[in-house]
Amino acid sequence: MIEIRCPICNHLLIKANDCKGEIKCTKCKKIIKIDTNNKDRVSRTKE
């Protein structure tokens, strides 16, 4: 299992084996794009 954290505030978002999609950080309220198939697990944030 991989721990995926917010790149802005380092808050734990999800623990998953495979995940692709978007999730909103409950701490800093940014939307994070997640793709665990790529080497870059967390890509960009939307404002």
Image (cartoon, rainbow, N blue to C red):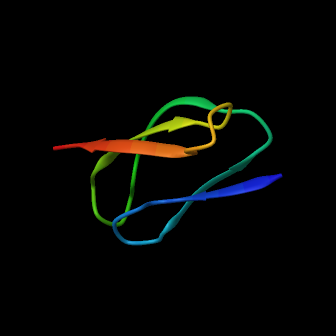
Question: With respect to residue 2, does 32 lie above or below?
Answer: above
Tell whether 8 sits left or right of 34. Answer: left
Q: Residue at x 75, y 33 (%)?
A: 18
> How many discs mark residues in the rendered view?
0
Q: Quadrant of residue 6?
A: bottom left
Quadrant in which the C terminus is drawn: top left
Residue 11 position in % (x across, y down): 48, 69
Task: State the residue in front, 43 or 15.
Answer: 43
Residue 3 position in % (x across, y down): 69, 59
Question: With respect to residue 14, does 22 lie above or below?
Answer: above
Q: Quadrant of residue 9?
A: bottom left
Residue 30 position in % (x across, y down): 28, 51
Task: State the residue in front, 5 or 24.
Answer: 5
Task: State the residue in front, 21 or 27.
Answer: 21
Residue 35 position in % (x across, y down): 57, 33
Task: State the residue in front, 36 or 23.
Answer: 36
Residue lying at the far front of the rendered structure: 39
Q: Residue at x 66, y 33 (%)?
A: 19
Q: Residue at x 35, y 66 (%)?
A: 27
Residue lying at the far left of the rendered structure: 47
